[in-house]
Structure formats: C-alpha cells, structure tokens
Amino acid sequence: MKENNIKISYDKESEVFSVEMKKAKSIDSDILGNVVIDYDKKGKVVRVNFYNFDFSAFKENLEVIKNFARKFRAPLLVR
C-alpha cells in the first residue's frame, strides 16, 4: 500500500494554514481571496495555502481536522 504523504500545518505567527499533498515543485497557482492552490507540471494539486487564517475562530472544528489527519496518516503540525 502506498503511504500517503499529506502534511497539514499551521503557522500562528504568519496565520498560514497549509495542506501539502506531495513534495513537488509548484509551477502554477490559482489565487482566490486568501486561498492559493499550487500545481505541479502535470496539473496536479501540490499544496493549498489559506492566508490570514484565524485558527482560533475554527477551534470548534479542531477535532475534525485532527480526525482528518489521523485518517490519512498525515502529520498535523501547529507552530
């Protein structure tokens, strides 16, 4: 079984919530408001960044995020 390499992180200082699907170079991006989606050369999503993300406003959903990370065996990093 192929191991999933999704990485979920949140940087409190810069208020960036990031979901990295895989380690790959981004060659294109879509930007909509505070959301940036990065794509690799094959057009696959590499990462999704949410800028100005106030994690405290989503505390009630923290358990949902933790469950998602556990289900996909993705490390959940909060800095």
Image: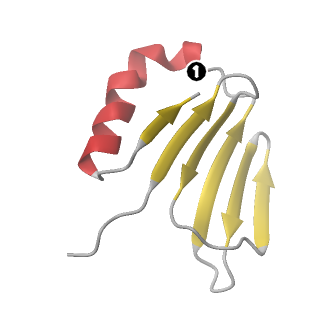
Residue at image position (76%, 61%) is 30
Q: Which residue is mark 1?
A: 55
How many discs appear?
1
Q: Is residue 64 left or right of residue 49?
A: left
As drawn, which residue projects farthest toward the bottom?
42
Horizontal and vertical percent position of residue 61:
40, 23
Q: Identify the image quadrant of residue 13.
A: top right
Q: Identify the image quadrant of residue 64.
A: top left
Question: Quadrant location of the N terminus?
Answer: bottom left
Question: Quadrant location of the C terminus?
Answer: top right
Horizontal and vertical percent position of residue 42:
63, 86
Q: Identify the image quadrant of residue 17.
A: top right
Horizontal and vertical percent position of residue 66:
34, 32
Residue at image position (33%, 42%) is 68
Give the answer, above or below, for where 20 lies relative to 3.
Answer: above
As drawn, which residue projects farthest toward the left?
1
Three-letter residue code for mark 1: Phe
Q: Residues within 10 Å of mark 1 (few under 14, many from 20)?
A: some
Q: Is residue 56 left or right of residue 14?
A: left
Coloring scheme of the render?
secondary structure
Residue at image position (62%, 73%) is 24
Q: Is residue 29 left or right of residue 22?
A: right
Horizontal and vertical percent position of residue 46:
60, 66
Of the pair 45 and 11, the residue shown nearer to us: 11
Give the answer, above or below, for where 26 lies relative to 47.
Answer: below
Of the pair 7 and 34, the residue shown nearer to us: 7
Instruction: Identify the secondary structure beneath mark 1.
Output: helix
